[in-house]
């Protein structure tokens, strides 16, 4: 998971575009947007993170940095 790649997705794409990218990755289709990542797994991780962050920002009015922090804390908690 690379924070700059997630930030780029949040800043440049809509929720709909990101959800379409998620579906394309899962279906092993060509992506309509540029998603950084060494493989499809990392690309999917970046897209899912960006979707979660955008939803948090829209639903709760959370600033990007706070939403990103919440997401990374969720990931750390699920790993440990």
Image: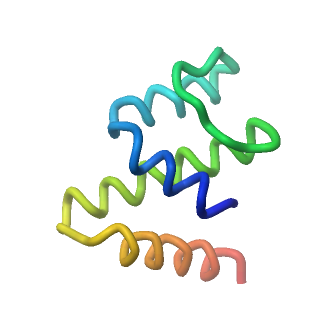
Q: In the current view of this chain or complex, which residue is farthest to the top?
A: 30
Judging depth in this view, the residue of 6 and 40 nearest the camera is 6
- Place residue 73 in its image quadrant: bottom right
Question: In which quadrant is the N terminus drawn?
Answer: bottom right
Q: Relative to residue 44, is residue 50 depicted above or below?
A: below
Question: In which quadrant is the C terminus drawn?
Answer: bottom right
- Residue 70, image x, y percentages: 44, 77
Number of on-image labels: 0
- Residue 49, image x, y percentages: 52, 56
- Residue 40, image x, y percentages: 74, 36
Way the structure is coloured:
rainbow
Q: In the current view of this chain or complex, which residue is farthest to the right?
A: 38
Q: Residue at x 52, y 29 (%)?
A: 21
Q: Residue at x 70, y 20 (%)?
A: 28
Q: Residue at x 58, y 22 (%)?
A: 24
- Place residue 27 in its image quadrant: top right
Q: Residue at x 63, y 42 (%)?
A: 44
Q: Relative to residue 23, is residue 78 depicted above or below?
A: below
- Place residue 65 in its image quadrant: bottom left
Q: Left or right of 71: which side holds 58? A: left
């Amino acid at each position: 998971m690379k924070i700059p790649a997630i930030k780029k997705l949040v800043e440049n794409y809509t929720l709909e575009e990101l959800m379409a990218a998620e579906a394309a990755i899962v279906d092993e289709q060509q992506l309509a947007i540029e998603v950084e990542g060494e493989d499809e797994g990392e690309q999917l991780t970046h897209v899912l993170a960006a979707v979660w962050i955008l939803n948090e920002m829209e639903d709760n009015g959370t600033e990007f940095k706070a939403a990103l922090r919440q997401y990374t804390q969720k990931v750390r908690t699920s790993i440990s």
